[in-house]
Image (spheres, grey):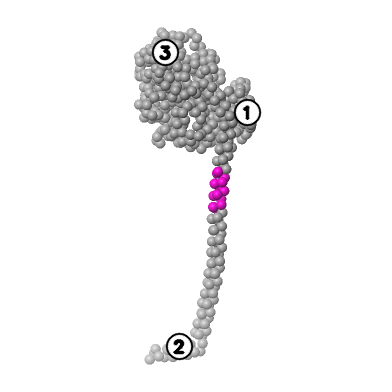
Amino acid sequence: MKKYNILFASHPDYSGNAKAIYEYMKENYKEYNLYYLINDESNYELLKSAGVDCYINGSDEFKKLFDKIDIVFFTHDELLEMKKPNQIYIYLGHGNSGKRFGHLLSENQLAVQDKRFLELMKENIDCAISTYDLWSIIYHCTFDIDFDRILPLGTPRTDYIHISDGKSNLKKCGIDTESYDKVLMYLPTFRNGLGRENDGAFSDNILNLEKYNEEELENYLEDNNYLLIIKYHPYEINKKNITNMKNIVVLDDSVMTKNLVTLTEVINGIDLIVADYSSAFSDFVILDRPVCFLDNDIELYKKNRGITFDNIKFWSPGPFIKGLNEFVDEVKKLLNNKDYYKEERKNYVDMNFGKNIENCSKNVADYLFKDNNIQKFFDKKKKTADSKLIELYGENLNLKDKLDRTIKNCDRLEKENEMLDLELRKLKDDVYNKKNELDNIYSSRAWKFSEKIRHIIRKK
């Protein structure tokens, strides 16, 4: 079996599905050369010291390495424009939510960057990994790629919710949860798409709810000994300074990266997630733990971005909340009654994950490499290349035939031109001879005598 050179890429660096399958393959597929692409130079020494063979995007070392890469696992848009004809690109994705994206958006909702991304995805994806059948259909519609290029094997990062110690990982990031009765996490979605205006609207309060006194939220959390952790999307900024709040903290991506911790590696240390239209909560539901949803700007979000199937409840296995009082009531129900929305959570998992709720890294890696199905993609690429070569050969034959016909036509025209030249020269000779004959006539004594007679006659 060939010793493949395999590259992994993600945003943020060393995170999500790419990190999960990299770590699994590093332990179980030692015969392959595994490399990780990073964008932030400050992570280089950290990852190297952790045994990750990483390369900085754009560096001379990476450019040399990339020429040798056979397979690329990626989660966003990394390296799409750099793909070489002999490489296999495997899209791992980075989350499943009800918000529309790709070709599910209308033409006027797609920015120039979106359109270019979709073109590159269609051209360059050899294989996409989906969580389950529903998402294979959505990927097919979203990226306009064939079903035979989509594998519903489950997403590798899901493994972390079973094998990670979430509370210890939070502690590594400076958040000690041991002294709190319950830990809540708020995961607002990314609202600005590639080049688009803000899809929704953040209010001036922490939870993006209808206006309330922030002290009420702080008092509620303190009275119940709850900790609220806010984890913004990697592309978003911290929208409010909350450093002085006792029961509210921000889990920062840069801190997580420095500790080699990702979101999926901490959420099993959380009791309840507060979400809006983000996909970040989806793996959490596999644990059958409660989720509630803030939809204060749902109408604006639906107008600017849209919801797949136009039904937000289809994607939300928990109650919707607009105000703080409602938030307090629903959180109480969810934490104290395990059956509250339990059926909805089960249906959500069945629909989005099926049986792909654990060992997903193994499923993906074994399917591709242990069962050697990766070769099918190389064979297909070679077959496509051969077909293209045959097509080009056929086009070349057609062009050669046209060229031969053109050359024959040119030869014929050249001969006809030579004949016309001969005829033209003959006509010129005839004209010249006729002119000489006329000149001889005009200069003869007989012509001159006849001219005198005509002159005399005209006078009479």
In this picture, residue 15 sits left or right of residue 188: right
Q: CA distance from mark 1 to mark 2?
A: 113 Å
Viewer-nearest of discs 2 and 3: 3
- Residue 286 horizontal/vertical position (percent): 47, 19
Q: Is residue 410 above or below residue 67?
A: below
In terms of depth relative to the viewer, which is nearer, 127 or 277? 127
| Residue position for label 3 | 338
Q: Is residue 241 visible?
A: no
Q: CA distance from mark 2 to mark 3?
A: 135 Å
- What amino acid does circle 1 point to? Tyr
- Residue 168 horizontal/vertical position (percent): 53, 13
| Residue position for label 2 | 451
Residues tagged 1 and 2 counted as in contact (Cβ below 8 A): no
Residues tagged 2 and 3 counted as in contact (Cβ below 8 A): no
- Residue 384 horizontal/vertical position (percent): 55, 41
The part of the chain drawn in magenta is: 387-399
Mark closest to the chain's N terminus, 2 or 3: 3
Secondary structure of the residue carrying numbered label 2: helix
Q: CA distance from mark 1 to mark 3?
A: 45 Å
The label on residue 32 is 1
Secondary structure of the residue carrying numbered label 1: loop
Q: Is residue 390 shown in magenta?
A: yes
